[in-house]
Image (spheres, rainbow, N blue to C red):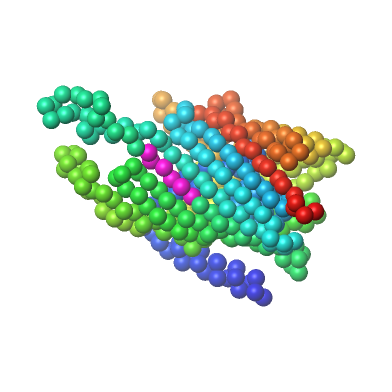
Amino acid sequence: MRTGIIMSVLVAAFQSVLAQVSAPKYSNEFLSIGVDARALGMGKSVVANSGDVASGYWNPAGLTRMEDKYQFSLMHAVYFGGIANFDYLAGATKIDSLSSIAFSAIRFGIDDIPDTRFLYDANGAINYDNIRFFSAADYGFLLSYARRLPALNNLRMGMNAKVIHRVAGPFANAWGFGLDAGIQYDHKNWLLGVMVRDITGTFNAWSHNPEMVLDVYNQTGNEVPENSLEITLPRLIAGIGRRFDISQHFKLLSEINLEVTTDGKRNVLINPGRFSIAPTGGIELSFKEKVSFRSGVGEFQRYLQPGGSRHWSYLPSAGLGIVLNAITIDYAISDIGNQAVTPYSHIFSIKVSLKDAQK
């Protein structure tokens, strides 16, 4: 009964936020890049099978599946030919046999951007010493709580409270707050998961410093920015997975996800209008649960080629994971064979698992 009431409230909140038609598209999109090389190697298809510290990002309900008392994870990746840096740090612990908590921190930033407003000195001569540098960075902080409900056939539920901080050098910054909610359910070898991000909408309050760029805006005829409120609309990710015991030592895991965005028509495989649906899929083959090989595919997009013809692109990925006692090292590479319009990326992540010292 209590679970039904909670879900009814969440659905009502979800529908109320959809009524916001002024929310911009791709708001806080840096939080959709993805963390953890294991998940990225599987094409981000882990909403149903995630069960470690990275669940704080993918589906907090999976935190209750951690086998160790403590887990910590670290990831670094570069995008756009090394221009942008993406960093992720997380820690999780089991409160008791039913509950877990986690904290995750994410940064996506472009550093050392030259500010050439003062390139010319008072005499009109170029002075490179006057060039200043700044960073444009987005930060996300997630506090996660998850609980397993044994009375409901081991249904798992979790929530995130997240704080967003976005910085555009000294020119503008924003603070935001939002909530995520997720569930997971297993039946024999079948895995089910649902994750709703920004379930009540994430509100970002932007504060601008127009006096720093007033002269430039007046010369170019652009509108001077004002303080504003930006709303990130909800997105729902549903996943279904299956475990296969191939032999005594080999196991196979497969999962398919559907990501539903609500901020308008996007360039994805299914885009009827107000909603856009992007499918992803991934597999993982493990040997003695010590070595894992992964592959995935997603980000189906249609793009225009020279000459006017249109073609579909997709983003394939692959990965490798090695467990060395308490340390797990994962690697992923995206855009194998140059099938997508985005360049490939190499991603590494490390996970450390610690048992309870008292046991």
Instruction: State the image quarter where residue 255 is shown.
Output: top right
The answer to whether one can see residue 326 in this image is yes
User: Would residue 357 appear left or right of 339 to someone viewing this image?
Assistant: right
> Is residue 325 or residue 83 the one in the foreground?
325
Q: Tell me what residue is drawn at x 76 percent, y 38 percent.
A: 325
Q: Tell me what residue is drawn at x 21 percent, y 25 percent.
A: 127
Q: Is residue 136 magenta?
A: yes
Instruction: State the image quarter where residue 145 is shown.
Output: bottom right
Q: Tell me what residue is drawn at x 25 percent, y 25 percent.
A: 128
Q: Tell me what residue is drawn at x 60 percent, y 34 percent.
A: 348
Q: Position of residue 330 (x, y in %)?
A: 66, 35
Q: Is residue 196 magenta?
A: no
Q: Position of residue 170 (x, y in %)?
A: 31, 44
Q: Which residues are magenta?
A: 135-140
User: Would residue 108 appear left or right of 158 to someone viewing this image?
Assistant: left
Quadrant for the N terminus in the image: bottom right
